[in-house]
């Protein structure tokens, strides 16, 4: 009986695509790697501008919706209270959308920008320092969060306002694609999304696991080997599988709350016991640089390459395009998840909440963790750059944290936080993957289905890690995520189309929810009339 509610074509389609990509990588790792990296270079150099344009358009679109009549629409019934309070909502949102990668990049991203700055600036110059403090915030800032938020609009709208019990990307583009959603195109959209997310999650694991491993190594002395990393991955999988299994109200919410408190504690500790004034001033300054150069950064595609004495840096493809692509493969998932937790909020609250809390959270991480590291470097207390050249990024992150007072305790907490961050992204991912392969989702998708995706999320990266092909998987997901750019436009269009239609059906602009209710009543009546025509004896029940 249960199995009838599974959408088998999507389930199997996603699985086959996954196998179809993994098996050649297992059999022919070198050739596979070369092919994928060629495809990646081709896409990011030729179509990089697509990604940047998408980012800006999505950002502008959301600003428009938030303050338009469509933003008033309530996700749920009139007078309904939000299902989760704002604290838990923000915590879940942040914990789902952000994984352990923020701990990785916020501590050391500045090193890369400092050594390979944008805009033809001299490496390791004072100007490079300034940009290094701002670029991280940009890549984890308002545009990035806008990419995350957009899919939530149509999905939440159909789930709560039109009350379709389906949590699927394809369902959210029905107003534009109509019947096609039920055919192969709809399945393809869902399968592409699943594929992108699995690859994006693979990237997260590829960064997170070595970092956690270095933390464990520092605390226990166990050498970092492939086997040890595999055990860490498995332990993380068990944690998030338990959380996904116990569901939204228990495991996922609890882990997210713990995640937020622990993160706030570590950030506060670094702020207080680290160079407080330097951190505050540098972060403040960086926000200024970002605001001043927002559009410049958002549109920099390096058009002149090596012409006329310019020196091509590859910075836009390597960073901004890569980041937008990475946020993009996660976006439908975060959209589905944000939609699921936003019952009782308005569209505007959802948009502003995601973008503001999301950006603020990232500013805190980059401002505090990043500038703590930068301060160590500039004052000569700890040569993070030299350490990184010798020992790689993962060990450097742990070494930077080890410069704090109570180093062992802080490394322990940092490692635990990384595990929880990883788990909170993966439990919600498996929850959503399970939803997408079901035809209908009551309150939550089936448990076995959630567990299945929890393990699938890890097993493939695990296999590839042993083969040394994890980088290839990352790149493949970015390549596979390319069509999502177009799906983003379909999503925006669908939302506008459906909500405008519902809103104009009423004359009451101020409260579209009331208006939508009225519209629905009308609809219902006409459905009943049709029934009566067919079967005049049928009672109105
Ligand atoms: N993003 C936010 O590993 C993670 O933190 C998950 C990464 C897309 C860069 C998301």
Image (cartoon, rainbow, N blue to C red):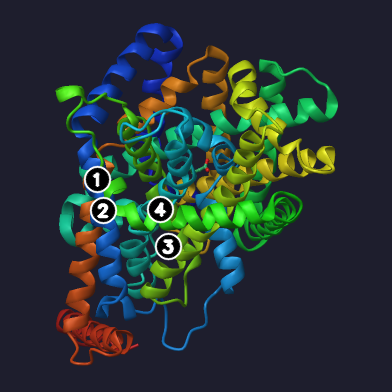
**Helix, strand, or loop for circle 1?**
helix
Where residue 442 sits: x, y (%)? 48, 63
- Pointers 2 and 1 in contact (CB under 8 A)? yes
User: Of 516 and 271, which appears nearest the observer?
Assistant: 271
Q: Please name the residue that numbered disc 1 is placed on.
A: 299
Seen in the image, is 421 located left or right of residue 21?
Answer: right
From this viewpoint, is residue 9 visible? no
**Circle 2 residues within 10 Å: few <14, some 14–19, many ≥20:** some
Residue at x-position 41% and y-position 49%: 138
Residue at x-position 31% and y-position 34%: 316
Q: Earlier in the sequence, mark 2 or mark 4?
A: 2
Q: Please name the residue that numbered disc 4 is placed on.
A: 289
Q: Please name the residue that numbered disc 2 is placed on.
A: 56
Rendered position, 34 above or below 54: above
Q: Earlier in the sequence, mark 1 or mark 3?
A: 1
Seen in the image, is 283 located left or right of residue 153?
Answer: right
């Amino acid at each position: 009986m249960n199995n009838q509610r599974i959408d088998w074509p999507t389930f199997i389609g996603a699985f086959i695509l996954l196998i179809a990509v993994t098996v050649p990588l297992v059999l022919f790792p070198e050739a596979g790697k070369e092919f994928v990296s060629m495809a990646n270079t081709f896409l990011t150099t030729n179509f990089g501008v697509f990604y940047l344009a998408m980012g800006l358009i999505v950002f502008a679109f959301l600003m428009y919706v938030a303050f338009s009549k469509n933003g008033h629409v309530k996700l749920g019934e009139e007078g309904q209270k939000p299902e989760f309070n704002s604290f838990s909502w923000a915590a879940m949102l942040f914990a789902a959308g952000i994984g352990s990668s923020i701990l990785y990049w916020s501590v050391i991203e500045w090193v890369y920008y400092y050594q390979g700055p944008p805009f033809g600036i001299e490496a390791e110059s004072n100007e490079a320092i300034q940009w290094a403090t701002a670029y991280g915030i940009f890549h984890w800032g308002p545009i990035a969060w806008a990419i995350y938020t957009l899919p939530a609009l149509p999905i939440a709208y159909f789930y709560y306002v039109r009350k379709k019990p389906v949590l699927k990307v394809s369902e959210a583009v029905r107003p534009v694609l109509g019947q096609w959603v039920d055919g192969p195109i709809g399945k393809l959209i869902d399968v592409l999304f699943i594929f992108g997310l699995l690859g994006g999650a693979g990237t997260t694991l590829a960064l997170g696991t070595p970092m956690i491993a270095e933390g464990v190594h520092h605390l226990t002395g166990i050498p970092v080997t492939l086997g040890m990393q595999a055990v860490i991955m498995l332990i993380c999988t068990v944690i998030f599988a338990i959380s996904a299994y116990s569901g939204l109200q228990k495991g996922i919410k609890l882990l997210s709350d713990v995640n937020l408190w622990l993160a706030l504690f570590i950030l506060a500790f670094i702020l207080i016991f680290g160079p407080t004034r330097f951190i505050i001033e540098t972060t403040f300054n960086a926000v200024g640089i970002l605001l001043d150069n927002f559009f410049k950064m958002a549109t920099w595609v390096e058009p002149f390459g090596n012409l006329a004495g310019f020196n091509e840096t590859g910075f836009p493809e390597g960073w901004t395009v890569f980041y937008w692509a990475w946020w993009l493969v996660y976006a439908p998932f975060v959209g589905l998840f944000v939609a699921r937790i936003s019952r009782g909020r308005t569209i505007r609250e959802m948009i502003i909440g995601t973008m503001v809390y999301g950006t603020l959270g990232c500013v805190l991480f980059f401002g505090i963790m990043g500038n703590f590291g930068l301060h160590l470097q500039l004052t000569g207390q700890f040569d993070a750059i030299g350490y990184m050249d010798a020992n790689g990024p993962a060990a450097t992150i742990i070494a930077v944290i080890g410069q704090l007072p109570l180093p062992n305790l802080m490394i322990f907490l940092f490692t635990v936080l990384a595990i929880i961050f990883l788990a909170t992204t993966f439990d919600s991912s498996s929850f959503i993957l399970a939803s997408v392969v079901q035809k209908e989702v009551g309150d939550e998708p089936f448990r076995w289905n959630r567990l299945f995706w929890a393990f699938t999320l890890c097993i493939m990266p695990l296999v590839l890690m042993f083969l040394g092909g994890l980088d290839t998987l990352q790149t493949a997901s970015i390549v596979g995520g390319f069509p999502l750019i177009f799906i983003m436009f379909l999503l925006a269009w669908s939302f506008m189309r459906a909500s405008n239609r519902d809103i104009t059906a009423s004359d009451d602009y101020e409260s579209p929810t009331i208006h939508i209710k009225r519209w629905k009543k009308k609809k219902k009546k006409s459905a009943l009339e049709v029934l009566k025509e067919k079967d005049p004896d049928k009672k109105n029940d």
